[in-house]
Image (cartoon, grey):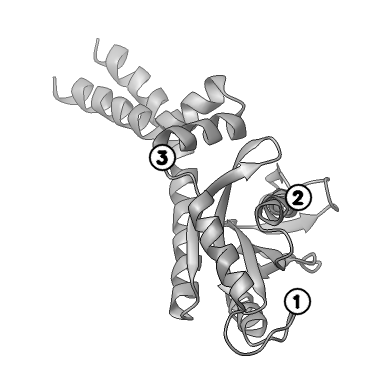
Amino acid sequence: MIWDVIFPGVILVSIGGRFLRRQIKGAVGEQSVSLTIKGMGLPIQNDVTIPGKRGLTQIDHLVLTRSGIVVLETKNYSGSLYDQGRRQGWIQRFPGGKQNRLHNPLDQNYGHIKSVEALVPGVPVTGFVVLAGSARFPQGAPEGVVTTRELKRTLKGLHLGEGVAPCKGPVPQRIQDAWVKLQQADYRDSASHREQMRQVTGGGMNYWLQTGAPWITGAGLALVLGGIFL
């Protein structure tokens, strides 16, 4: 009888824990990038949801520099990464032979950049994928991918007028106005975030597992503990 309770609990913990660990890992990576940028004294917007080509799109970070708006997609990956080219995905390999095929975040961030450009036409917009974890490209990282340390140098160059659309002195008024417009365009309500999650996950079971991971894990733990102590 005990195992009739514990076994389903273990299954729920396994399923929910998998998605929960992924969410926590992503949140830790995004937080580390956010703290890095704040430490540089640059204005930043985190977890921004704006209109995109196919509905709402979620952007990890927007950064204001003298040269324009910078769009960042953070990935907290481990292992060795291999780029297969645009729209071809990445290969993630681990010691022991295990490997995963990952959606190419450069393609993802390209869509984010285009969404920002559509909201603030005429303002320079550039973007990067930030590797916040231990993953590296043994054959060399593709253009547009930086580590957290490289990001600091890149943003410093942009802010000092050494990068895209160089501009020295204070942030130009048109870029400041664009920054305010992006803040105003950000959908902060929970309904918008739920809708954005439905679009990303495709709805159905994937959406339920992504959004319900903490509850699934908690329910599984309750069943396991209940089976042990009852």
Report the label total. Answer: 3
In front: mark 2 or mark 1? 1
Residue 107's disc is 2
For the question of whether residue 14 can be seen, the reply is no
Q: Give the amino acid type for the residue marked by disc 1 in the picture.
A: Val
**Which residue ends up furthest to the top in the rendered image?**
1
Horizontal side, residue 150 vs residue 111: left or right? left
Q: Examine the image and state in which quarter residue 171 appears.
A: bottom right
Classify mark 2: residues with Cα within 10 Å, few (<14), some (14-19) or many (20+): some
Q: Quadrant of the N terminus?
A: top left
Between circles 3 and 2, the one closer to the viewer is 3
Label for residue 164?
1
Question: Label 3 is placed on what type of residue?
Answer: Asp
Q: Residue at x 27, y 26 (%)?
A: 224
Left or right, 43 with reference to 214: right
Residue 53 disc label = none
Closest to the observer, 23 or 96: 23
| Residue at point 48%, 81% (across, down) | 40
Q: Position of residue 174 (x, y in %)?
A: 63, 71
